[in-house]
Amino acid sequence: MAYYLITAEALENKLSEFKRRLEQNDFLYLQPFGRALTESLKNAKMKDSFIYWEEEDYCSPPLKEEKEQVLNKYFRILNILPVNKGEGWKEIKALKNLF
């Protein structure tokens, strides 16, 4: 199991649609990553125009399936940094919640 600290920017005019879909749990049952992705994104943080979250992932390259099915529709992924479980959340703890 691998964990990553993700840094992203929302695509223009896509954040409100993403928020609605996240609140409706539209991504929850996507296999095999829906539960982990939904939980991570509901806890995402923001600073300036950057969005951060820790993601559990098994893909190679990292977030391959998540990007294809969800993330590339709403975000421009800027950085995927390997971390130990929980380390990413600790690093962004003081930031404000995305929603």
Image: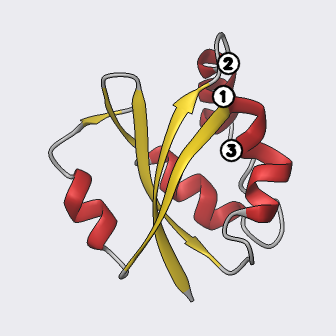
Inspect the image, locate mark 2, and give the three-letter code of the amino acid beneath it: Lys
Mark 1 Cα within 10 Å, few/some/many (few <14, many 20+)?
some
Farthest residue, direction bottom: 1
Q: Which residue corresponds to the image point at 85% horizontal and 49% vertical from the top-left?
A: 69
Element at label 3: loop
Which three-letter amino acid code belongs to the residue tagged 3? Asn
The image shows residue 94 at horizontal and vertical percentages of 14, 45
Q: Residue 30 location in percent, x, y?
A: 82, 60
Tell me what residue is drawn at x 31 percent, y 74 percent: 86
Q: CA distance from mark 3 to mark 2?
A: 17 Å
Q: Label 3 near label 1: C-beta < 8 Å?
A: no
Q: Is residue 78 left or right of residue 14?
A: left
Tell me the distance, in whole angstroms, between the alpha carbons under discs 1 and 3: 10 Å
Q: Are marks 1 and 2 in contact (CB under 8 Å)?
A: yes
The crowding category of the residue bearing disc 3, from other C-alpha atoms within 10 Å (few below 14, some 14 to 19, many at least 20), is: some
Q: Which residue is mark 1?
A: 18
Between discs 1 and 3, the one toward the N terminus: 1
Instruction: Identify the residue shown where x is 66% and y is 28%.
Output: 18
Q: Mark 1 falls on what kind of element? A: helix
Pair 3/2: label in front: 2
Q: Quadrant of the C terminus?
A: top left
When asked about the image quadrant of residue 76, the answer is: top right
Q: Which residue is mark 2?
A: 14
CB atoms of marks 3 and 2 within 8 Å: no
* Number of marks: 3
Left or right, 53 with reference to 57: left
Residue 26 placement (x, y as % from top left):
76, 42
Marker disc for residue 25? 3
Disc 1 versus disc 2: nearer the observer: 2
